[in-house]
Amino acid sequence: MSWRIIRQIARNGIRTEAAPECSDALRVEVERIQHDLLDILGQALTIRQVDAGSCNGCELEIHALNNPYYNIEGLGIKFVASPRHADMLLVTGPVSRNMQIALRRTYDATPEPKLVVAVGDCGCDGGIFGESYASCGRVANVIPVDVAVPGCPPAPIEILRGILTAVRRCRPPV
Amino acid sequence: MLIPGMTLGLHRLSAPLPMWRGTVDANEWLVAARAVTEGGGRLVSLWATQRDARAFAVSAAYAVQDGLVWLDLPVASDKLSYPDLSSIFPAASRMQRASADLLGITAEGAKDERAWLNHGAWPADHFPLRRDASAPRPDREVVDYPFVAVQGDGVHEIPVGPVHAGIIEPGHFRFSVVGEKVLRLEQRLGYTHKGIEKRFTELAPLQAHRLAGRVSGDSTVAYAWAYCMALESAVQFDVPARAMWLRALMLERERIANHLGDLGALGNDAALAVGLAQFSRLREDWLRASRQVFGHRLMMDCVIPGGVACDMDRAAAHRMREHCDAIELEVQVLRKVYDEHAGLQDRFITTGYVKPPLAARLGLAGLAGRASSQAWDLRSDHPWPPYDQLDVNMATDRTGDVAARVTVRFDEVFESLRLIRAICLGLPAGVTCSEVRLVTDAASGAGWVEGWRGEVFVALELDSDARIVRCHCHDPSWHNWPLLEHAVIGNIVPDFPLINKSFNLSYSGHDL
């Protein structure tokens, strides 16, 4: 039994790919990202994901960040279960009116630096759903947003780039 | 005779699957419902419509042996009620509550009249799908919901959500437990309600497939196909053969992508992290291959009115077949790992059990239904092109536990891999899309597709200006959410994520 698991792991080896530069397509070393996280935050980055009304497409791509190709935990970035443990909220939208209060309370429960990355076209501008009796539209209509990542849904690498961009923006002035 | 014992003036819709539509009166409405259930049929969907100032109607779609029957019951504008169906089809209850929230049309005699989609964010007397609905006063407070309380020594409640601990959609679960044991689960959904059905009426029919493709992101191909089928049936348009084959190809790719993701997550929820690592690797390979051929990892906006927005040359078809061979070998290895892992099987077997008679009574749909002896699969029951040439083998199981739902998923992965290879070989030549001309008469059509989770149904009505009057989208999750409440009874709380994942129901597709 366990030899089969070990053989499967060994045969596949390490599939993790290089991480992206924060703002352009250049590739950088994993160590640099880890250093940046340590320099800026002084710790690993913890993220609380909030689906505020999306179609679930963005969630699928955020999930993909945890697969061995992107290996986001290897970079020192971890999804956590509570906003109280989080440095960053990764929010997908549009924000439905039924989720408005829950999203605001989640934001209030998040400690500093309280970074917010809005993911997907709907999170950026309401997308195809727009604003209506049931939808507040973009995430920024409900809580302050640091970085918005367009795409329907954005590819995992774009989401990762958005996360790193938000961290770099949070660097205190020297 | 479509509904046993009844002769109704039904007309057949021009669609690739056998579907009929007709009008009934209040008496026939109930007689038909009873006849369907006695004849072994099931309720597919229930929804309400306002066609013009005084014309209200409630509609039910039934799956019967020969196909689907869509029945309309006109509702008087001064009374706005219709006979309750939930005593015959319990699954109707939430759909009736949603119709009451959206149109103010109520089921007479229904036991549960609590609001379902309206959480208080808009006024209770505002009905968004009414023709004259103006924008409601914004910024209202969400109101409390009267959950059913369980009383007794040592009973306590665990409220979960709407913001869940994982990367998943929002909803609220209220557990009543004694110690670790779940006595009762009550769900409250509607958190992702974003006004999709209202939005449809603001879009042009030839554009609205994009919205349909975003009803539930993991079923974008199924919804886009069902919407396009409804539109094409309304205007009596024949889809080019090559486009039909490519639609089926993408539908099967979507099925595999979701099963790969869920099989990994199920391993992970039972503490076999290597299962997640391996399956999520296969899923990523699969999505990248979809992007290469169709230009989008989830294949959004690839199914369009009139055909498909993509094509595949012979070399790509060859590569896809080879990729299927490679994935098949990998999944076989992982299936052995899952089957032989005692700890994993201990968590899977007898967990989240849904007995077949209960599944039949409540209408458990799709793959979860097939894992509880509900042998329905549109691809085998009513094989429409190209499935009529592919002879789909339906995967079923009788045990109805998490292990059964895992088995059905594995079987469906292998069957869909076979179908994809057959489609790659048999893909007919020709155009992939031709122009859909809208008609100037009021028209209606329906789409019915077996998505990865179960049957997706779309009912579409157009007016004489070729505008969308009503587009109702139905997700199989409507039927399956109440069964999840039953499946968890008597299990321990830590098994809930595992049971939940084995169903993997849609919030967005349900909440609309």
Image: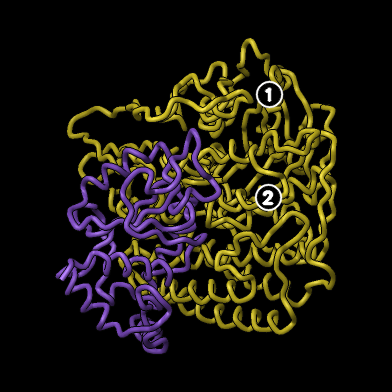
Chain colours: A purple, B yellow
Q: Position of residue A44 (x, y in %)?
A: 20, 70
The image quarter in which residue B388 lies: bottom right
Disc number at residue B57? 1
Residue type at mark 1 is Ala
Give the residue drawn at x 53%, y 45%: A129
Residue B189 left/right relative to B74? left
Residue B338 left/right relative to A143? right
B62, B359: nearer the viewer: B62
B487, B322: nearer the viewer: B322
**Which chain hosts label 1?**
B
A162, B398: nearer the viewer: A162
**Which chain hosts label 2?**
B
B225 lies above or below B415: above
Q: Position of residue B365 (x, y in %)?
A: 57, 47
Q: Position of residue B410 (x, y in %)?
A: 53, 67
Rounded to the nearest whole Å, what is the CA distance between mark 1 and mark 2?
26 Å
Give the residue drawn at x 31%, y 49%: A144
A98 lies above or below A110: above
Find the residue positioned furthest to the top. Answer: B78
Residue neighbourhood size for the residue with mark 2, other residues' Cα within 10 Å, grouped as few (<14), some (14–19), many (≥20): few
Disc number lying in front (1 or 2) = 2
Residue type at mark 2 is Gln
Give the residue drawn at x 26%, y 55%: A81
Q: Which residue is under mark 2?
A: B207
The image quarter in which residue B123 lies: top left
Judge whether residue B503 can be spotted in this image.
Answer: no
A162, A69: nearer the viewer: A162
Q: Secondary structure at mark 1?
A: strand
Residue neighbourhood size for the residue with mark 1, other residues' Cα within 10 Å, grouped as few (<14), some (14–19), many (≥20): many
